[in-house]
Image: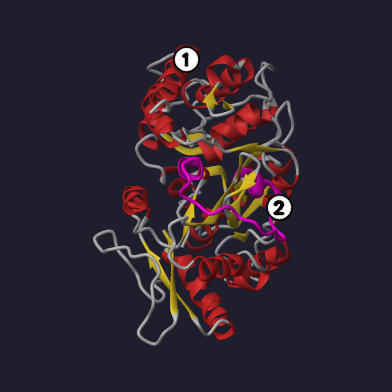
């Protein structure tokens, strides 16, 4: 999941040490809780203050390790036995710990988002308690779409059509410095002032959603299969062509190396349609000086099928205070435990009963976030999983970057990327 999350009880920066739970001098059992987002940490501070009143013998010590260092420190701490008692993980890293006996299985149930529960279930057992989740929808600049006569809620795409609705709309929304649109005589692709859409190698927010909406897949079991699936190849080519052939999206030379480029263009009024998740809400709200809204995910041949990803809290199998650790895990899986996350507008909570609090937070600010709920309610596209899926993604990404730059053909590039990814996952 993308970057979410003030220090609470204790903040451990990457240079600091990480110590599993122990006993404080006042006799309370200390359970450590690690996450990577300082903003969400403030919500956990509120949550655990309530928990400790109900559990006076347990103290929760919250550790914040920045995302840039999180996945370097965590493996080392797990091996050394110094990992936090409870810590955040994502699907890319779950299998590595669940399959190697490093986690406690979750043997209790909760009112949790079904799709996220599925992401953290392996071998018939649940290994993580859903904390946050996000889906994908379409942010749009109201001024730009109204001027172009485009209804973002009605947009669909079809890679087999010579001129599908999305490509036609994006040409209307894209302008060069002289006010010309792609396809018009004299249009200058080297001097684009307003882009139509954020086509880019953003797998969660863009690529996988097009693949899913075209009926393609990315993975079979713990093996990448994207190069073997014609609909995946077709969807990838469509996205790449929006950049290099259609000139309706920013150059991959910019977006490959700057994951925030599209967000920056949108908030500056230079991008009409920005496909992203609720993790972009605060940045858009704070940065956009124009009227904006959120429309449903783009409809493809297979429907509106986007990625739902979630963060889960997992418990270390090497905790020295199992009973107290399980109590903390149960708390962060409860409505009371997650209410501060939702009420603070940080993210959709894993507990479904308190999701309305997140909706209400943004409603009070004039933002309707229901398209994200709708996107998560139907058929969804699973984020990749597996013990070494992170290593696989790291191996194939440079090859996909070449594809998006137009330096490699789509079919050839996907074959090379799939081979490199699967090889890296062998260990």
> Residue 285's x, y, as percent?
53, 61
> Residue 384's x, y, as percent?
54, 35
For the point 62% across and 64% down, the residue is 333
Q: How far apart are marks 1 and 2 (CA)?
A: 35 Å
Check the image and report above or below for 76 versus 163.
Answer: below
Q: How many labels does the image show?
A: 2
Of the image marks 1 and 2, the number of the one nearer the N terminus: 2
- The part of the chain drawn in magenta is 92-119
Check the image and report above or below for 13 versus 254.
Answer: below
Res. 344 image quadrant: bottom right
Residue 149 part of the magenta segment: no
Give SS at disc 2: helix
Give SS at disc 1: helix
Quadrant (top left, top right, bottom left, bottom right) of the C terminus: top left
Q: Quick one: label 2, few (<14), some, or many (20+) residues within 10 Å?
A: some
Residue 97 part of the magenta segment: yes
Q: Residue 415 carries which label?
A: 1
Instruction: Report the mark closest to the observer, 1 or 2.
Output: 1
For the point 67% across and 59% down, the residue is 108
Contact? badges 1 and 2 (CB < 8 Å): no
Res. 426 image quadrant: top left
Q: Which of 90 and 146 is in front in this view?
A: 90
> Residue 343's x, y, as percent?
62, 71
Please give the residue where the numbered disc 2 appears in the rendered image. 373
For the point 39% across and 87% down, the residue is 26
């Amino acid at each position: 999941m993308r970057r979410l999350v003030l220090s609470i009880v204790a903040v451990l920066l990457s240079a600091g040490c990480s110590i599993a739970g122990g006993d404080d001098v006042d006799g309370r059992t200390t359970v450590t809780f690690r996450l990577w987002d300082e903003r969400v940490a403030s919500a956990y501070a509120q949550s655990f203050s309530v928990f400790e009143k109900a559990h006076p013998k347990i103290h929760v010590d919250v550790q914040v390790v920045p995302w840039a260092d999180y996945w370097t420190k965590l493996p080392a701490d797990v091996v050394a036995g110094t990992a936090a008692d409870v810590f955040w993980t994502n699907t890319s890293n779950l299998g590595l710990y669940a399959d190697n006996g490093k986690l406690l299985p979750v043997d209790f149930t909760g009112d949790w988002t079904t799709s996220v529960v599925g992401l953290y279930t392996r071998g018939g057992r649940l290994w993580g308690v859903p904390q946050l989740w996000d889906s994908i929808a379409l942010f749009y600049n109201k001024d730009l779409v109204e001027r172009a006569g485009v209804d973002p809620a009605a947009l669909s795409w079809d890679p087999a059509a010579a001129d599908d609705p999305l490509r036609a709309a994006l040409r209307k929304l894209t302008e060069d410095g002289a006010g010309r649109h792609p396809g018009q005589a004299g249009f200058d692709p080297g001097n684009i002032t307003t882009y139509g859409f954020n086509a880019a190698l953003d797998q969660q927010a863009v690529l996988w959603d097009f693949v899913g909406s075209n009926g393609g897949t990315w993975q079979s079991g713990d093996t990448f299969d994207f190069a073997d699936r014609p609909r995946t190849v077709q969807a990838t080519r469509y996205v790449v062509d929006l950049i290099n052939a259609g000139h309706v999206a920013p150059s991959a030379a910019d977006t490959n190396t700057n994951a925030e480029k599209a967000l920056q263009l949108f908030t500056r009024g230079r991008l009409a349609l920005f496909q992203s998740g609720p993790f972009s809400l605060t940045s858009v709200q704070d940065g956009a000086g124009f009227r904006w809204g959120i429309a449903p995910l783009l409809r493809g041949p297979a429907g509106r099928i986007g990625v739902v990803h979630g963060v889960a809290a997992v418990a270390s199998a090497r905790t020295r205070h199992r009973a107290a650790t399980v109590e903390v895990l149960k708390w962060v899986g409860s409505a009371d435990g997650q209410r501060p996350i939702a009420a603070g507008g940080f993210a959709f909570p894993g507990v479904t009963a308190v999701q309305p609090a997140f909706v209400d937070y943004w409603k009070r600010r004039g933002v309707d976030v229901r398209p994200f709920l709708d996107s998560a309610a139907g058929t969804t596209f699973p984020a990749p999983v597996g013990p070494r899926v992170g290593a696989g993604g790291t191996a194939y990404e440079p090859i996909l970057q070449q594809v998006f730059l137009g330096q490699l053909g789509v079919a050839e590039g996907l074959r090379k990327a799939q081979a490199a990814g699967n090889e890296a996952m062998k260990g």
